Amino acid sequence: MRTQGALTFRALVAAALIWLGTSPALPAPATATGPYDVPLTITAYGLVYVPVRVQGFTVLALVDTGSYLPLQISNRLARRLHLPLHRTDEVVSGYDFEKTRVYESTASLALGSFAQDDVAVQIAGDTLERTASLVGTRFDAVIGWGFLRDYYTLIDYRLRRFRFGPAPFAGDGYRLAMRFREVQRAPIVDGEVDGKPTALLLDTGAPTCSLDAATFALPLRAFVQSDVTVAGSTLHLRTLARDMTVNRPLGIAGILGTNLLDRYAVAIDPHDGVVEFF
């Protein structure tokens, strides 16, 4: 059992990031067809992780639709693998760290039976190490939206499985279905919060749903009950008020995080811009 104070602090370090500069290189398509199934680990904070192999070395990777790079690795892992780092024009900033220069390298990547060589990987100082320490789970990689946007993806919180591939996933009928749009490589859903039209980031890297304190006139770090309407359905959710200045370039005032997502199997269709909750 963790205290609310600890949860409040750690929720502030969700992995949603703003990227400034040129767009990162995307990995080349894999030669195998898939689908690819990978076991999913869910922590006490609801964050979802999968085992990945980078240059043959197995580490835990956060599955984070709120991160805009395809594959980010820790500085610790880059050093262990002796990867040569090349400075980029990109700068990253987040809730728990200041603007940090991004460096790039290449490495092989494998998730289950999925494998690619010479994938571009990004390193941003010790940002992953710091975030890992704050959320209480050591991880050394992030599979971000820049990767997921190229595949149909299923994140099943109930059966604890992660699946991605080139074809849509059939289900027994969704409970919620909504359209999303991309803004700066981020999946954005249009909804309402307490009757106010609100753009929301779909973020598997956020431990809780959040609202911009300034937009909704809320005290910072306060938890409030909010009526969040998406896809014509209204859900009564516990939300965290925080300073979301870092997210201003996305035009959002809220985040759909774990305490909504973990009720479902979440299927993402990046080609038609649809997310379905089963």
Image: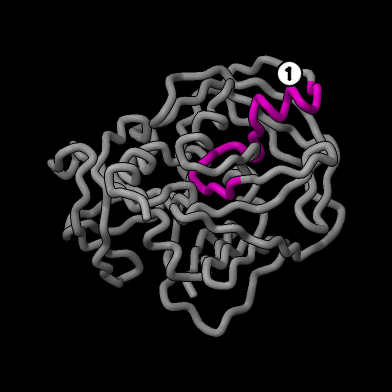
Residue position marked by numbered label 1 in the rendering: 85
Q: As drawn, is 238 to the left or to the right of 176?
A: left
Q: Position of residue 61 (x, y in %)?
A: 64, 45
From the viewer's perspective, is residue 172 above or below residue 232? below
Residue under the point 64% across and 30% down: 74
From the viewer's perspective, is residue 3 above or below residue 264? above
Q: Position of residue 189 (x, y in %)?
A: 39, 55
Three-letter code, disc 1: Leu
Q: Position of residue 9 (x, y in %)?
A: 33, 38
- The crowd level at tag 1 (other Cα within 10 Å; few <14, some 14-19, many 20+) is some
From the viewer's perspective, is residue 222 above or below residue 24? below
Q: Which residues are magenta?
A: 62-83
From the viewer's perspective, is residue 186 above or below residue 100? below
Q: Secondary structure at mark 1?
A: loop
Residue situated in front as seen by the camera: 111 or 187: 111
Q: Position of residue 26 (x, y in %)?
A: 70, 38
Q: As drawn, is 258 to the left or to the right of 58?
A: left
The answer to which image quadrant residue 230 occupies is bottom left
Residue under the point 67% across and 63% down: 163
Does the magenta-highlighted stretch encompass residue 272?
Answer: no
Query: In the picture, which quadrant includes the N terminus?
Result: bottom left
